[in-house]
Image (cartoon, coloured by chain):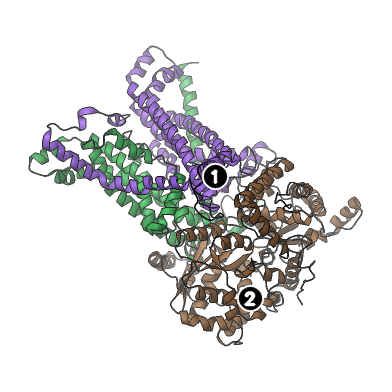
Amino acid sequence: MSKDKDGNTAALGRELDAWLRGDHSRRAVLRQVLAASGYAALGGTLSAGVTQAAVELASPDTPLGRVQAAAVRASTEGPQNGSAYRAVQAARKFKGVTLGMTYEAGLQALEPRNFSGPLWQQLTGMSYNVVELSHPDQYAKPIAEHIAQSGAYDTLDIEPAWIPSLADGGVIAPIDDFVAKYMNMADLEDYHPLYKFLPTYKGKRWGFFDDGDQLALYYRRDVFEDSKLRAAYQAKFNRALRVPQGWDEYAETAQFITDQLAPKVYGAVHFRKAGSPGNQYGFMQEYRANGGVLFDGAMRAQIAGEAGVRTMRQMLAANKGSVPGNDDLDAVAAWVAWLQGKAAMLYSWPPTGRMSENYSQRDKAVNFVPHSAIAGNVGYAVMPGGNGEMASGYVKALAADSANPEAAYLFMQWVTSPPVSLVRVMLPYTLRDPYRMSHYNSPDYRALWPASKEYLSTLAEAANGGVVDMIMPGWQDYALSLDQMCTSVWAGTDPHAALTKAAAEWDAITDKIGVDSQRAAYQQFLKLPGSAANHTIATMGLAVHAN
Amino acid sequence: MSVVRRRRWTGRLRFLAIAAALLYVLLPLYWVAVTSIKPSDDYLAVPPVWFPAHPTLVHYAAALFAYRGLAGLSHSVTVALGATLLSVLLGTPMGYSLARFRTGGTHLAFWVLSQRFLPPVAIGLPIFLLYRNYGLYDTQAGLVLVYTVMTLPLTVWMMFAYFRQLPRELEDAARVDGCGWWQAFLRVAIPLALPGIAAAAVFAFITVWTEFFFALILTSRHAFTLPTVFRSFISFQGAQYGESSALAMVSLVPSILLGVLVQRHLVRGLTLGAVRG
Amino acid sequence: MTPLAPSVFLPTGARGRTAGGGRAAWLERRIGLLLVAPAVLLILALSVYPLLYSLWVSFVNYDFLVPGHAFVGLRNFASVIADPIARSSLATTVVLSAIDVAMEFALGLGLALAMARPFAGRGLVTSVLIVPLFISPVIVGQFWALLLQRPFGPTDYVLGILLGQPVTINWLSGFPWNFLALILADVWQWTPFMFVILSAGLTAIPDEPYEAAEIDGVNGWQAFRYITLPQLVPMILLAVTFRLLDAIKLFDVIFMMTGGGPGTSTYTASFFLYELGFQHFHLSEATAGSWLFLLLTAAAVTFLVRRLLRAEAAQ
């Protein structure tokens, strides 16, 4: 897609809107439609081929424009020992090669199409092909392509928790040799420590972490500071209203706010719908905050124990104090309710902070959420109990069947390098979230809205106490079982019965993959920071803070 | 109760039933149409916004141009046309052969019919595994072949039924006049069967145009069709209501127009020619 | 209009047969084979061969999480049969498709009767009523998800106004509403199928019996019961058979509306096999399950088509 075409599309949209409002001549619209249909014909013939594009750059006097200019400078002028510069230099010999790169369909894919793809092409002469996949297909399709031996993909956006399955299955390749050859190790140190360790498995590095999906608690300062509400809370509980510090308190606070303010504002809102994105994250987060252990020595699932039942009880209580229809909401619907001011608390991914301040909505692509009615009133906190899930996240991994692994690796190094990744986590429409210390400390990011400094340091703190998804072979199977368990409980199944059933499913999965190999994988997972509430970056004494 | 009063009463009931059916059919269509032009600020309004104060076409522009809608549309058109053509090209001679020469007796005819009832998931898995050997995975050609097989029972049986009702005498006369069987088929039977062929083609096209399962499992980068793009708006985080509605509108207009166009042949199409319309 | 085109379901003897034996018949057989060959070969290559191949897959280990293709005998079949989700999804398939088809039949018949007598605008109304037949089932699923899903869909709000009190039904995630939602969507799409076929059947019934009945003072219900229904039986069987054989493949609407949830309560056989095979790549188990499903389907086809043929023969 070319810049002209983009401009044309936007212009077309404006013209048609104007026409609908009745303030434009029909002819102007028809002209635009004709122009667009010309592109439509072109689009048809070009669609299977390589899409060429120009880089979309913001005005250089904006924070985004400044970091974009810095990224271009770092890629072309150096410092010459920077990972971005080295990657571009080495990549020039692959001029003419086309890289197939998987991204999640929708907003995630707009970034490589509008920014990093075309810029890489200008810098190196390589072409690129953005393959848009739905999230579950980001796991399934690379496997399908590997089974089909098509070599269609070069770089993959995958969940860290898929690394064991994909590595053992031969779908992805380790990148240690390339790292030794090309990487500036200081840039590896720039990662938040939680994310630095995530892409390692069986002693090898399987990609670069590339999306800091750390859950944090977003709350309405205006609600929590409301004097009438505070007085009522004091009267009822004999203590001051505060942002909840534990999961029982969270449900209790949500219920209290709902009782006081509904239907104007409800205590909380959650995404609890099956599969969008699924309840495995919420369950794993609270289960481990409750001290839950996943497996015993014989690798039998422990989720049906006391911690599991307690987790389900807390989640049910939280549902009860939430926006009506809570159990049917996916993440976008939860955002919509939140942005319209319907909820006092929402735990979710970092885009929540950017949308709340209307930073995201300035981009035309972000038209699936409304404008924020709560800008300026949003506070940030680590999760109740302090252990927020690093829910999903993305690792940029190297496809084992790539015909050009070195070229693919160089793109991975460049696109995740500090200056380039900073742009990618700052683009208004992006769903890619900060993960480097240089992101958290960026003066330009901190200039995006009044509270953005607080936002960034909260994200860094949340990762210090963050727990990670179960990075083991078969995670997709275990996760599906959890999601099904939770949704059946929302629909009325007894929590203990549902947990027992899920535990039996977990055991069947473990047996199928092999108890011994899973035990070894579990032992290894336990060593990763964030595997348990008592084994986080913070408890290991590795905590870092934004300055 | 007198006959007249009973008549009036059943007449009203009849009217009510038809009105209710129309409402039932139109309500979802209306809601999707209106969602496709709603600004996102109107999504969750209470009471619901039945018609937006500021209708917008941004969702259409985004679905088609910013996302992959246009490419999906172009693949859908190519694949549907290709499969329709192939299905008619192969199905018409077979239908003719079954009708005129009773080739294979009833067994062959029913064997073809039985393909219509195969669960797609049963052949989807092995086809996925085999396509990598054929180099057909994620190609439009691969989809065309699968869809041809999927629509062959329809075209074969519709043409089978059609040729059986055509009088054989004209072809016999042509052959008495010195035409070979091939020319009798091409010059006499085919022109007479054109309306039937057109109807079969339209039903094959609609079948392919609306198919989702094979497109889902056999494509990723090069051959994705409109329904799979549609699916990608229902993402990890949730649905992009406006975009998916806009794309739904784009997808359903051609097939509805075609369908209403061949309404006369609908009975035949739905029953694979077993019932003559 | 003829109810059944010259009885295509029955071997009809001489009608297609040409006179004269010897060389002419031999030539015709050759020509006949030539004309069917391309279609038959394509079906063999893309349907029969894959099925045979999948038979091999179902007897070996073919699993993304477990390397190698060792022969495992009946283990894949055993593990699918033992899987409680497989059994519940089969049960869901049977129950859902039975309810779907029964409702589609009842509503389709009612609509066909209501539309039987001409009135102004009948053509236009018919055109509108058949529209759902031409829409992709994925999109139909999304239609109903949009309409029903809280808080986006207006359904609960409208119900609340009609009932005079707030309605908070979880249409997609609460039992039994989720099943009702799935049925609403399927019935929406396929009632026109019944309507169209049964209308054709009604039109084909001659007027004479009704005229005679009118003279005898027979009331409307009796006329329906003793004249209309018996004449309609072959059409009813045909419509129900065709529809039932499609309904048991139910996949798209599940995929879009409930994703099989809550829990696995709305898994159908097709959705279960898709999840097993294409999301989690337990390919050999999924193929074994497919074969079992295929055999069950084949049994249903045989049974239903036999019934259909017998009914037609009885006419």
Label annotation for residue A190? none
Say which quarter of the image contains residue C118: top left
Residue at image position (61%, 61%) is: A164
Tag 2 secondary structure: helix
Q: Amino acid at mark 2?
A: Leu
Residue B225 vertical position relative to residue B198 in the rendered view, above or below? below
Tag 1 secondary structure: helix
Please state the horizontal and vertical placement of residue C4, each as a whole percent of the image: 32, 30
Residue A119 vertical position relative to residue C40 in the rendered view, above or below? below
Please state the horizontal and vertical placement of residue C214, each as a whole percent of the image: 38, 15
The foreground one among A406 and B38 is A406
Residue at image position (68%, 65%) is: A350
Residue C181 vertical position relative to residue A118 in the rendered view, above or below? above
- Disc 1 crowd rating (10 Å Cα; few below 14, some 14-19, many 20+) is many
Q: Which residue is mark 1?
A: C272
Image mark count: 2
Please state the horizontal and vertical placement of residue A206, each as a whole percent of the image: 60, 68
* CB under 8 Å between discs 1 and 2: no
Colour of chain C in the image = purple
Residue B9 vertical position relative to residue C256 in the rendered view, above or below? above
- Chain designation of label 2: A
Q: Which residue is mark 2?
A: A422
- Tell me, yes or no, if residue A50 can be seen here: yes
Colour of chain A in the image = brown
Side of B183 relative to A153 (left or right): left
Colour of chain B in the image = green
Please state the horizontal and vertical placement of residue B64, each as a whole percent of the image: 47, 61
Side of A381 relative to C109 (left or right): right
Residue situated furthest left in the rendering: B177
Q: Amino acid at mark 1?
A: Phe
